[in-house]
Amino acid sequence: MEDGPRGAIIQRDRKTYAIVPRTPAGIVSPEHLENIVAVVRRYNIPVIKMTSGQRMVLVGIKEEDVESIWNELGMTVGQATAPCVHYVQACPGTVVCKYGNQDSLTLGLELEEMYLDMNLPAKLKMGVSGCPRCCGESYLRDIGVMGNAKGWTVIFGGNSGGRPRIGDVMAKDMTTDEVKDLVRRLLEYYRDNGKPRERTARFVERVGVDAIRKDVLAFAPYIEVGETLPK
């Protein structure tokens, strides 16, 4: 990450910056929206862009204005380059969606809060979907969780970038508490064994799914030993 103002990303013109306020699981309060509108108008910020990760990026900020804007927003930084959890993308799930099987929004918020400050080999994104329609793009995220009528499916090693990869199913029909525990185990294993700047997709390709199942799943008490999981 290049040196520069706190939580700011240098832009193409090499003069202005962009910032990404943190909006957990895509949720933003009326107060935060009002603050965003106020600073955009006050500092003449030319672009507000909705990102694929359910966040807003403010683009075209002068370097000397960055710190004042953060102070006036009253929002924390949504990481964009650091080796940590960048965001959890979550669909509405059972909160409002008629198709929702599981409460993906609550779980997404909890996972983001639990692992926000965890140091990892590279950036990491999560996707939580409340039903098999998979609006949280769970199969294309480093950590994916997808709900159905029987519980949750946990997926690991997905990526939607230049070298896309469908994640591998780690376990199915899990409770919410089991999901939280398995996500912890997977992240700790990745943290301890991943190479610097190695995303989970490349990590899984390097170490192999069988090794992850042997080293992680075999020690999870809620997964039957020798259980065959679909790819």
Image: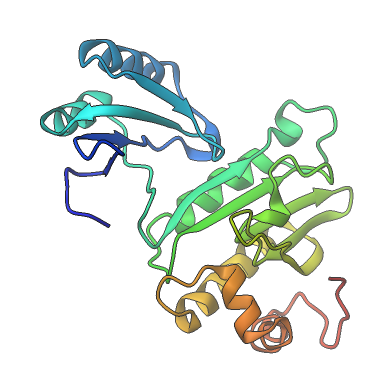
**Nearer to the camera, 191 or 45:** 45
Residue 53: give x, y in percent of width and height. Answer: 54, 40
Horizontal side of 6 relative to 106 (left or right) equals: left
Residue 227 occupies quadrant:
bottom right
**Nearer to the camera, 176 or 124:** 124
Residue 168 occupies quadrant:
bottom right
Horizontal side of 129 relative to 196 (left or right) equals: right
Question: Please, is residue 189 above or below residue 154 in the view?
Answer: below
**Which residue sits furthest left?**
64
Residue 205: give x, y in percent of width and height. Answer: 65, 78
Which colour style is shown? rainbow
Q: In which quarter of the image is the C terminus?
A: bottom right
Residue at image position (38%, 67%) is: 119
Could one spot residue 176 in this view of the protein?
A: no
Horizontal side of 175 relative to 60 (left or right) equals: right
Residue 26: give x, y in percent of width and height. Answer: 54, 33
Horizontal side of 153 relative to 9 (left or right) equals: right
Question: Please, is residue 48 above or below residue 188 in the view?
Answer: above
Could one spot residue 101 in this view of the protein?
A: yes
Residue at image position (66%, 83%) is: 212
Question: Please, is residue 28 above or below residue 230 in the view?
Answer: above
Question: Please, is residue 187 above or below residue 25 in the view?
Answer: below
